Amino acid sequence: MPQAEDIRNKRTRARISNALFYLPFGYYYIVRLGTTGKLLSWMLIYLMPTLWYAMLTYQGNPWVFAVNYALVLIAAFSLYELGYIFNDTTAILREEQPAIRLYDYNFRHFEQYKTAIVAARVGYALAAMVLLGAVCRHYGVCDAKHIGMTCGCIALILPLFALYNRWRSTSNVWLYPLLVCSRYMPFLLLYHFDALAITLLLLSFPLVNWLERFSMPRYRFPLMRRIIPTEQSKTLFRVSYYVVVVCVLLLAQQWLQFSYAYMVPLFILGLYRLLVSILITFYHPKNYLNG
């Protein structure tokens, strides 16, 4: 593979266990995140907004809600991690400048046990979706239509990621928002359709993440070169993004009169990005803005 970028030294472990191919969330944490700080960031940008906006769409037993949320999370992320696994083992073979995240023995294990890895990941997702349907029907918290929409959105992750991994060109950046949204949307389809909650959930991270994607060296579009000329520029861009979004929402609230509760995740994320921008002036967290 020509001009490969070895980013394994950015990880916190010198060895990556093959068991991670089979452990939900384990692969993402060790291989894709690599540090506790990035794990906490992921919890804030993914778990917090999906949990919050899902709660706004639900009225009922909090324990049933917690179980349903956990099942959707396991189902969606098991498949999303499978996409990451294929990206790191197979899709990179078609890239001119692949990012190498795994070791030789990981590649060999994947090739030898590919079927078992896929079966395990799909098995987790199917089991979680079956349990989700059983819980929803037993407690009567959602109908078959919403269960089907949720499971359909989760199932869509696989073909979207497969297409993304197969389509290795600068143009696949246009597919990226659908891919990111596929792991956010299932949480808001289970109970009832709340257009405002869905819109703000997508504003909370998927949109800013997509805009940043246009600024990556291999994708950098002319307009984004001006807004985010370097990787380090992302810090200021993130702060600016949330300031603008929060200001627009505060103005919109005066006209639409929706609850301030809808804006809480965006306030939190804006504050988080501001604190990070202050932190990095005197301390650079390991793996920050890296792979």
Image (cartoon, helix red, strand yellow):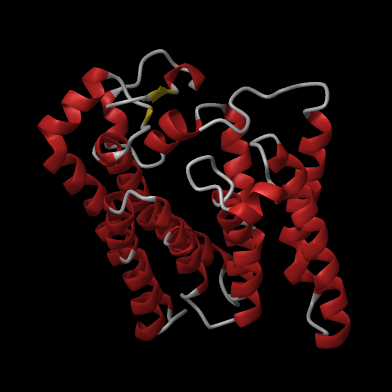
Q: Residue at x 41, y 81 (%)?
A: 146
Is 218 situated above or below 123?
above
Is 16 situated above or below 57?
above
Based on the displayed image, in which of its 4 quarters is residue 7 positioned? Answer: top left
Q: Is residue 48 among what the camera can see?
A: no
Q: Is residue 158 left or right of residue 55?
A: left
Q: Residue at x 69, y 34 (%)?
A: 232
The image position of residue 168, as x and y in percent, is 32, 48
Q: Is residue 49 left or right of residue 275?
A: left
The image position of residue 177, as x and y in percent, is 49, 61
Instruction: Please identify the residue farthest to the front as the structure is shown.
Output: 222
The image position of residue 130, as x and y in percent, is 28, 66
Based on the displayed image, in which of its 4 quarters is residue 248 positioned? Answer: bottom right
Q: Residue at x 50, y 62 (%)?
A: 184
Is 268 situated above or below 65?
above
Q: Is residue 224 among what the camera can see?
A: yes
Q: Residue at x 38, y 32 (%)?
A: 97
Q: Is residue 99 left or right of residue 243?
A: left
Is 4 situated above or below 176?
above
246 or 172: which is nearer to us? 172
In the rendered image, the quadrant that contains the N terminus is: top left
237 or 46: which is nearer to us? 237
